[in-house]
Structures are given as structure tokens and as C-alpha cells.
Amino acid sequence: QVQLVESGGGLVQAGGSLRLSCAASGRTFNIFGMGWFRQAPGKEREFVATIKRNDGNTYYRDSVKGRFTISRDNAKNMGYLQMNSLKPEDTAVYYCAAYRMPWTSAPLNADTYDYWGQGTQVTVSS
């Protein structure tokens, strides 16, 4: 099993920045890639960004391209989501997730992820 723990959420004004961290522990050698999802109140969970562990290839949802950056530190078993130019519509609970399968295309569906963190709240005030 793999355990994921997010940190770094909080309250920020529009235009501000936050950096989310995801610490992985357990059988981390099983992880092929990781991603970030978010869920706003009354809405479905949606994909934000994903990164492959080996080559660092990334993929983002359109609304965060140019503002968010996903990264990983394999030696530390850490993942990150740098969020800049935050908007009120970015307000949500953000979840870190990891997957084991070597998907050839970017895994955008939550069902393709095997492990999930507990989530961290991000609130952007206008």
C-alpha cells in the first residue's frame, strides 16, 4: 500500500500563490505517476494536473495551464503543485493521487488512480 498526505492549503487572496505538497510513503516503488484533483462544494471531483514519475511528463487541465506547475522529487517521494495567479474559482479541496499502471496517455480520470490523500482545503478570496 501507499499512503499520501497533502499539506500547504490555506486562505489566499485572488492573484496570490500557494504550494501544495504531497508526501508518499509505503510501497512507493509501485507508483508510476501522480496527479492532483480538486472538488468544489456541490461539484464533481475534477482533474487538475498529472506527472509521470520516470520522465516527468506533465499534463494540465486547460483552466490552470500557465498558472499551475506540477513537479516531483523522486528521491524524497514528494509531489508538488505550485499554484500562481489564483482565482476564486480555484477554491476547492485539493487531493493528491497516485497510479501504478504505465498508462501511455495522461490519466485524466479519477478511476485510473489507485491511491488518494485526505485532501487539503484551498480558499481563494476575491
Image (spheres, rainbow, N blue to C red):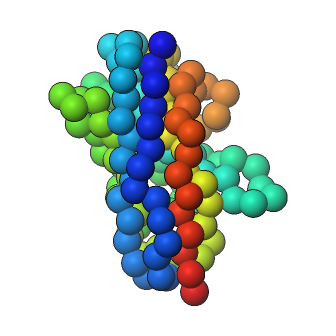
Image point (37%, 29%), residue name: 24
Residue 43 against residue 101 in the figure, above or below:
below
Image point (49%, 72%), residue name: 11
Q: Is residue 94 visible?
A: yes
Q: Is residue 125 left or right of residue 33?
A: right
Q: Position of residue 55 (x, y in %)?
A: 27, 30
Front position in the image: 3 or 34: 3
Residue 109 against residue 40 in the figure, above or below:
above
Q: Is residue 47 left or right of residue 54?
A: right
Residue reaching furthest right?
A: 42
Image point (77%, 56%), residue name: 43
Q: Position of residue 66 (x, y in %)?
A: 39, 65
Q: Is residue 50 visible?
A: no
Residue 29 against residue 85 in the figure, above or below:
above
Q: What is the quadrant of residue 5 in the picture?
A: top left
Q: What is the quadrant of residue 42 in the picture?
A: bottom right
Q: What is the quadrant of residue 108 in the picture?
A: top right
Q: How many marks?
A: 0
Q: Position of residue 87 (x, y in %)?
A: 54, 76
Image point (28%, 25%), residue name: 54
Q: Position of residue 29 (x, y in %)?
A: 33, 14
Image quadrant containing the C terminus: bottom right
